[in-house]
Amino acid sequence: MTDLMPQSATHAEEGAVATHRLEAHDLSLGYGDAPVVESLTVEIPDQQVTVLVGANACGKSTLLRGLSRLLRPMSGQALLDGKAIHTLPSKQVARTLGLLPQTPLVPDGITVVDLVGRGRHPHRSALKSWSSADEAAVTDALTLTDTLDLAQRPVDELSGGQRQRVWLAMALAQETDLLLLDEPTTYLDIAHQVEVLDLLLDLNRERGTTVVMVLHDVGLASRYADHLVVMRRGRIHCQGKPADIVTEEMVADVFGLTCQVVPDPVAGTPLIVPVGRHHTSDPQPGKGETR
Amino acid sequence: MTLTEPPATPVVDPVAVEQVRTARRGTFRRRRHVVVGLSLAVFAAFTARVLLGDFTITVPDFFTIVGGGTIPNVPSASFILMEVKLPRAVLAVLCGAAFGVGGAIFQAVLRNPLASPDIVGVSIGASAAAVFAIITLGLAGPVISVWAVCGALVTALAIRIAARGSGPVRGHASSTSSYRLVLFGVVAAAALQSCIQYLFTRADLYDAQLTLRWLTGSVSSADWQTIRILTVLLLATLPFVGWAARTLPIVELGSDAASGLGEQLVKADLMLLLGVVLVAVAVAASGPIAFVAFLSGPVARALNHDRTTIAGSALVGALAVVAGDYVGDYWVPGGNYPVGVVTGAVGAPFLLWLLVRGRSSKEAG
């Protein structure tokens, strides 16, 4: 981890202002002529867990792609450590910013330890062959994701949950200060979803890794996020602590869903209880208005 | 929750490290076995090609002739060895390796065994340009080879541009655009093939004979001049091939993951360019030896537990051409078939089998 900023960027104290290594200024992103994300400015707080949520096609994955250098800005800038991320050498970025893409491809025949080893690529060069630092990083990544016993197995033999943990191990082996994940829990069952999210939280709390992820489930997002960014139609609708911003009005505005927001009995964070056509609560004074 | 000190470097458990080491060793051991085994096979085939056949040469005689002497009672031995058998075998090894590596690179970058330069028309593009130069422009000599290389490059560029995908990452090689690339490539190959046949009808007898060499790959007209040039060119590409072998494992993971690991997306295109150059140069030296570029990657992978290996592909390609040349020359009764016919005969059923088996997609999620 030789590209760390000086340690003055310490974790935010309660109520103190967080520093931001990763940010977007007036960023517009798109795939064709029309921008999907428009003139968006956001600062990702360091050493916290930031979650991007929003309805389908609101631009949250696009924003993540723009922040992780996968997508060129149409206008505006994505900045890492104050410099436009597209102007930085790509290996240097890869040593600072790790990415877990949405649908990673598994090459044929690759074993778990092979795949995780490839995460060391940004730290290696033509002259540097496999070193003990590489070995330590891979071992550490496998241990953290509890995939050490799977080390010799081919990845395509593993279950969905195991495979996702292996991809996460690869991103961990990269030893980056920031980790960006695009819907890391989408194809997993509930137990594995919680497992992966708990692991990410461990990383943040114990190692100070800045985690930025896109999640579909606002309830899970509220549980795990220090900083929640809610997007709507390519712009930020609101952002802040989940307890502050997850309200019935917000959910109705952003997702078009009538709901009740109750405190999660386990975590205390806001839990969204949807009101559909078949399951409605007793009408309460001033609430329950349909769209 | 606050951190008051920098995150501690994780303490690593030596038992766990040992587990990782063992796991890694397994992969390397297999690859080493494959490379060593194939090298021995290529050496054996090379030896058979040079020493055996209609005109056998013993090992001591071989060293005598190579050392510059002649064999008493058999004055033609020097000529046959030094001007016919040896150059043929050497050219076969070099071209086979070039085809093998070019094909393997294409198939790995595009993640599609069908997307091989000889299937998508790169080889035929080289042939078409050469035939055009011979018949229509009336050229002769080494300039034809230059035309061949240019033809391959132009064809590859045209297919690449035409097949540019419209996905989230536009304009770069990815698995979704490989389907389009194969489609365009096959169409281009068919079109170029009909061009060649048209030109053929307008050729006079002498040109037609010259042209044949550009239609079916053959090492029978090998000469040391060609081999020297080919060796120099291939040596020049060697550092790039080494770079490709190191970077391919990353590009194989898909454009998103590769980008996340610090490999810019343009690297995939550069690798394809390297593959085109290798194939173009080999076609310029020996003509389009059918299916070698297509077969080498999958066969090497099948030996290596389904893992891509550039070195293995080079060796399989060399083996295919040397063995194919040997078979074409001696094993088929009553005929002296150029190696392109033999590899074509084996390659076509293999292609069919691959299509019938279906491409198993191994996408995670």
Image (cartoon, coloured by chain):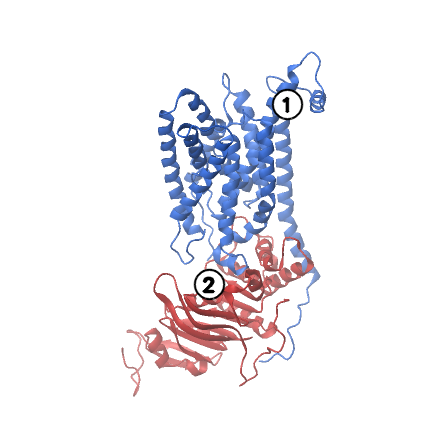
Chain colours: A red, B blue
Q: How far across and how far down the image is residue A222, in percent?
A: 45, 76
Q: Nearer the viewer, residue B65 or B100?
A: B65
Residue marked by disc 1? B82
Image quadrant occupied by the C terminus of chain A = bottom left
**Distance of label 1 from label 2 (alpha carbons):** 65 Å
User: Is B339 left, or right, of B128 in this rendering?
Assistant: right
Image quadrant occupied by the N terminus of chain A = bottom right
Q: How far across and how far down the image is residue B103, in percent?
A: 51, 40
* The quarter of the displayed image where residue A172 is located: bottom right
User: Is B47 left, or right, of B134 in this rendering?
Assistant: right
The verdict on a common chain for dots 1 and 2 is no
Q: How far across and how far down the image is residue B222, in percent?
A: 56, 26
- Compared to residue B325, the image places residue A167 above or below, namely below
Q: What residue type is labelled 1?
A: Met
User: Is B155 left, or right, of B61 in this rendering?
Assistant: left
Q: Nearer the viewer, residue B263 or A217?
A: B263
Res A188 label: 2
